[in-house]
Image: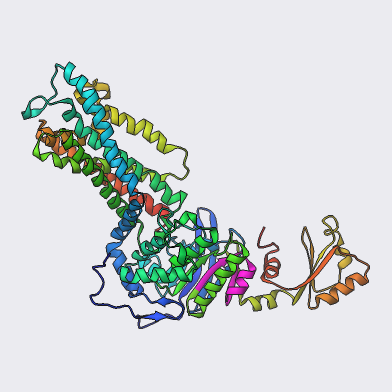
């Protein structure tokens, strides 16, 4: 930065609040993001993640608290803040009447960038997004995954230091998600600060150095994925299915096994340091689950523990 | 395309192994340029889009005048000119043919048709259908700049339409005076005077319940028929003459008649025509900006 006093944090939110009438979408959240970090907001739909992203992106004004991006208040320095950012919105908003490559060019012009830079940059980004052979195609001829990759390419046209990604892989098939993750990981390695919202725990675990778990506009927990799991869950989880009519009633018979028990409509979760040992105890009690599975704890378990609800309904 | 604002002789040599070409501008420089030229940047986008359906634009610009001028000039005009003993006021030029009389109205109508198309569905598309406004909204551009850019784009299309139409008017002998070319602009002004308030209205619509079809039926059509288009407004009963007085079409048509065949009216009325059209533009622009800012959150 040409700024002599480079801010310690690229994003700094303190008691950030957004109300729509009586409804509180974001309820006084605070966090700081240092440069180069991949920072995640994990939470179910309606948790206030997208609203937070809009405030960071300077397209929604906060109703309380403080917020700075690169030391600038997005309300007073909207264009300056947005010039720092690359934004991947939850819903693609590409111009379907323009060709693929033209979408990149017109977007670059919004940043005052000259065509002498934009022409080669657009080709480069098409390659990065694996869309080189689609440059002259119409946008509506692209698949969902291709549109998403084009949206990410578009967000990079101004060579941003900060990338805002709102649910970047929602609605994509597994293969398309992995391609996207690979691209995002490379950007992170190159020092780009990633801010992403997701309700996929695997996405958060793959990409985020640190994350906040958000529910009903509030921060429930904060830390690295591994630390959050260590803190709020056991090492392993034993998943048992006794059939939908039995899952609810079998709880009493499982008493004392593992550290904690969670009964869901379709299965019973036993949190234990050693899942296999817990399973042996169960069979020793003469219980015969239809299926059993031992796995490592995930952020899904952290969320369940903190809110009593699943991430994906 | 070249960029006149780039520092002369600046060469981009900076390249990162992963991030590729580095931006020649700092974010602060980008923001400064966007603050200054953002409206033009959005107009560029708009016109690039227009190029995408260029063939449709040319076809409507050429086809519409051909159809109307044949219908009016060869069809209706023959009938009117043969049967009318009340000569149409041709000002200093004396009585004029029906085609000459109706030409300024047809020209302004074409502009209003284009404007009502570009300021309804394309606005809805930006906010709702393809959400194309939300892309630029996340860039350094302001909401007001999106409005300005859109208006510049529409103005270019309007001038293309009225310009081509005017050539056809000349071809059909529908213009008598050398000042007739001014109609290209007075007609385009009618398009904006009608289009800008419509743009503001379109930006306020959240759910599409067929409002635009209603506008077409109950606003555009009556204006087309009752604005002194096919016969002088004075021929209408007083009870419906007000439709013409509030209609941008009538004001623009009267201006067109003055420059096209020397139609005479009190000078103060001419000033009123121009001011009224400008007023509609200003009011429309004000509310369009207000609604865009509300909707886009900044």
Which quadrant is home to the C terminus of chain A? Answer: bottom right
In the image as oriented, which residue stretches furthest toward the front? Answer: A133
Q: Quadrant of the N terminus of chain A?
A: bottom left
Return the residue found at the far left.
B92
Which color scheme is applied? rainbow
Which residue is located at x 65 percent, y 78 percent? A226
| Residue B247 visible in the picture | no
Q: How many marks?
A: 0
Looking at this view, name the residue that lies furthest to the bottom.
A4
Residue beneath the point at 27% across and 52% down:
B152
Give the vertical position of B100 relative to A286 (above or below): above
Q: Quadrant of residue B213?
A: top left
Q: In the depicted view, which residue is nearer to us: A63 or A145? A: A145
Residue at 17% from the left image edge and 40% from the top image edge: B183
Residue B165: percent from the left, percent from the top? 23, 39
Q: Is residue A91 magenta?
A: no
Give the image location of residue A184, x and y in percent.
53, 72
Residue B88 vs A243, above or below: the answer is above
Relative side of B251 to A51, left or right: left
A257 to B176, vertically: above or below: below
From the top left corner, tell me how far across and down residue A244 is, in percent. Answer: 82, 56
**Was residue A211 drawn as part of the magenta stretch in this picture?**
yes
State whether residue A16 appears in this view. Answer: yes
Range of the magenta residues?
A194-213
Horizontally, residue B128 falls left or right of residue B67, namely right
Q: Position of residue A163 (x, y in %)?
A: 47, 70
């Amino acid at each position: 930065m040409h700024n002599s006093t480079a801010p310690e944090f690229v994003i700094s939110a303190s008691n950030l609040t957004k109300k729509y009438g009586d409804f509180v979408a974001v309820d006084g959240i605070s966090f700081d993001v240092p440069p180069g970090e991949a920072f995640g907001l994990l939470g179910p739909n309606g948790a206030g993640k997208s609203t937070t992203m809009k405030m960071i992106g300077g397209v929604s004004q906060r109703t309380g608290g403080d917020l700075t991006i690169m030391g600038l208040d997005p309300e007073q320095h909207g264009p300056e803040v947005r010039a720092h950012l690359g934004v991947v919105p939850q819903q693609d908003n590409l111009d379907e009447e323009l060709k693929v490559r033209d979408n990149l060019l017109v977007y670059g012009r919004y940043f005052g960038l000259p065509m002498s830079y934009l022409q080669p940059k657009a080709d480069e980004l098409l390659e990065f997004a694996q869309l080189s052979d689609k440059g002259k195609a119409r946008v509506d001829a692209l698949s969902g995954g291709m549109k998403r990759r084009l949206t990410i390419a578009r967000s990079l046209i101004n060579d941003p230091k900060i990338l805002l990604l709102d649910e970047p892989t929602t609605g994509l098939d597994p293969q398309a998600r992995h391609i996207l993750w690979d691209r995002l990981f490379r950007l992170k390695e190159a020092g780009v600060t990633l801010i992403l919202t997701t309700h996929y725990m695997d996405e958060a675990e793959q990409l985020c150095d640190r994350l906040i778990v958000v529910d009903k506009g509030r921060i429930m927990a904060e830390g690295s994925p591994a630390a959050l799991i260590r803190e709020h869950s056991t090492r392993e989880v034993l998943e048992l299915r006794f059939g939908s009519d039995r899952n609810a009633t079998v709880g009493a018979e499982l008493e004392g096994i593992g550290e904690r028990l969670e009964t869901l409509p379709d299965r019973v979760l036993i949190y234990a340091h050693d899942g296999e040992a817990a399973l042996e105890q169960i069979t020793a009690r003469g219980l015969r689950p239809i299926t059993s599975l031992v796995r490592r704890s995930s952020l899904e378990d952290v969320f369940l523990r903190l809110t009593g609800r699943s991430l994906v309904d | 395309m070249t960029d006149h604002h780039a520092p002369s002789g600046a060469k981009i040599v900076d390249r990162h192994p992963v991030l590729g070409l580095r931006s020649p501008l700092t974010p602060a420089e980008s923001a400064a340029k966007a603050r200054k030229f953002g409206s033009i940047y959005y107009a560029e986008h708009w016109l690039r889009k227009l190029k995408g359906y260029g063939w449709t634009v040319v076809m409507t610009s050429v086809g519409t005048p051909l159809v109307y001028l044949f219908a009016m000039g060869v069809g209706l005009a023959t009938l009117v000119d043969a049967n009318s003993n009340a000569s149409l006021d041709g000002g200093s030029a004396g009585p004029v043919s029906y085609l000459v009389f109706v030409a300024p109205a047809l020209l302004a109508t074409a502009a209003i048709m284009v404007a009502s198309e570009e300021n309804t569905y394309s606005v809805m598309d930006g906010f709702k259908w393809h959400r194309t406004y939300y892309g630029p909204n996340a860039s350094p551009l302001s909401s007001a700049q999106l409005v300005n850019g859109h208006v510049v784009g529409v103005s270019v299309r309007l001038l293309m339409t009225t310009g081509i139409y005017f050539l056809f008017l000349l071809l059909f002998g529908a213009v008598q005076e050398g000042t007739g070319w001014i109609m290209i602009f007075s007609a385009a002004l009618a398009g904006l005077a009608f289009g800008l308030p419509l743009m503001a209205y379109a930006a306020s619509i959240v759910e599409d319940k067929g409002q635009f079809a209603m506008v077409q039926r109950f606003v555009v059509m009556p204006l087309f028929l009752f604005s002194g288009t096919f016969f002088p407004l004075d021929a209408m009963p007083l009870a419906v003459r007000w439709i013409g007085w509030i209609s941008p079409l009538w004001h623009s048509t009267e201006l067109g008649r003055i420059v096209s065949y020397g139609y005479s009216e009190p000078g103060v009325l001419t000033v009123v025509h121009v001011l009224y059209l400008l007023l509609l533009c200003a009011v429309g622009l004000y509310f369009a900006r207000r609604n865009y800012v509300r909707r886009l959150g900044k």
